[in-house]
Every structure is written in structure tokens, then in C-alpha cells.
């Protein structure tokens, strides 16, 4: 029985709040779907922030480019190198990343590639594999459509002649 029909039950004071929350979540889903955005888009980090957090020990920075690129241009100072070009494909990359974080899928990591494309692919693969704190340095090492990148921002680079 409801209060509307018999006047004996009162509506929950939380009912309006729950409906408003549900409507808000539905609107967000529609907006994200319409723009092509995803949850991963909210885990984007600037090169400066990645550098600062890596130097402070709060974050593991991973360069996912190829060994040839590491040798040609160097790597961001403090970055670990785990190539997305694993012989076993993305499955091999995910396995190598799990080893890099000692199995801690909650460890905060930031991925960087040349221009932000491979790091986006890598971020999605890691998220799908259960990693929960994966950031994308979408500007990349040499820059591209998302910004000038690590090198042009004057951030520290280490040579890697034997990568």
C-alpha cells in the first residue's frame, strides 16, 4: 500500500535523492558515450606531473616505446622500460607489466610513448587486465596532437645506448 492510495505509508525521504542520483549517472553515461570519452580519459597526466610524481616516488613511469626508440632518443629520467612491442602481443605486455609492479595491480603507474597513441592502447589493455591506477602521459615523449611532449617541455632525459 502506498500513501497515494490509502494514506497510510509515507514515501522514503531518500527516494528523491536516489532518483536524482540515477538521473545524473544516466546523463553522464549519455554524455560520455556521445563524446566517445571513457573512464580512461580521466586518467590523463601531464609530462610535468608525471616527472614530479616519479621524482617524488609516488608513481612508476613506464616508457612503452620500442628499444630502437629508447636508443635513438633516450628515455624520461626515472622511467622503467617495458615495450608494448612484446613478441606475445598485448598479452605479453600485460604480463611484463604485472612483473614490473610485482603483481600489485593497484600501484600507480603512468605510461608514455612517442605521441600518446600506444600509451592509450596500453592503458586500455592494463585496465582490462585489472590494473586500477593507470595514467596516460598522452602528450608523449616527442609530442603530438595532445601537446608538445616531454622533450619540448625541457624535462630530464637519460640516454639509453644499450637498451
Image (cartoon, rainbow, N blue to C red):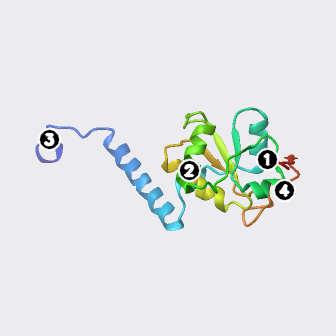
> Which SS class for mark 4?
helix
Residue 34 place in picture, x, y as percent: 49, 67
Residue 61 place in picture, x, y as percent: 71, 43
Placement of 57 over or under 111, stated as above or below? above
Of the residues tagged 1 and 4, which is closer to the observer? 4
- Compare marks 1 and 4 and give the one earlier in the sequence: 1
Residue picked out by circle 2: 92
Q: CA distance from mark 4 to mark 3?
A: 76 Å
Of the residues tagged 1 and 3, which is closer to the observer? 1
Q: CA distance from mark 1 to mark 2?
A: 29 Å
Q: State the mark number for residue 121.
A: none
Q: CA distance from mark 1 to mark 3?
A: 62 Å
Residue picked out by circle 3: 7
Q: Which quadrant is home to the N terminus?
A: top left
Residue picked out by circle 1: 48
- Compare marks 1 and 2 and give the one earlier in the sequence: 1
Residue 128 place in picture, x, y as percent: 49, 50
Amino acid at each position: 500500500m502506498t500513501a497515494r492510495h490509502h494514506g497510510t505509508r509515507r514515501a522514503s525521504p531518500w527516494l528523491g535523492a536516489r532518483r536524482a542520483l540515477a538521473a545524473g549517472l544516466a546523463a553522464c553515461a549519455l554524455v560520455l558515450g556521445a563524446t566517445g570519452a571513457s573512464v580512461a580519459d580521466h586518467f590523463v597526466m601531464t609530462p610535468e606531473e608525471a616527472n614530479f610524481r616519479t621524482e617524488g616516488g609516488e608513481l612508476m613511469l613506464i616508457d612503452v616505446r620500442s628499444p630502437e626508440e629508447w636508443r635513438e632518443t633516450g628515455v624520461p629520467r626515472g622511467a622503467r622500460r617495458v615495450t608494448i612491442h612484446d613478441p606475445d602481443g598485448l598479452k605479453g605486455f600485460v604480463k611484463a607489466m604485472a612483473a614490473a609492479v610485482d603483481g600489485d595491480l593497484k600501484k600507480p603507474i603512468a605510461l608514455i610513448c612517442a605521441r600518446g597513441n600506444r600509451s592509450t592502447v596500453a592503458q586500455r589493455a592494463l585496465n582490462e587486465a585489472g590494473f586500477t591506477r593507470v595514467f596516460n602521459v598522452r602528450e608523449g615523449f616527442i609530442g603530438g596532437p595532445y601537446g608538445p611532449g616531454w622533450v619540448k617541455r625541457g624535462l630530464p632525459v637519460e640516454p639509453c645506448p644499450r637498451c
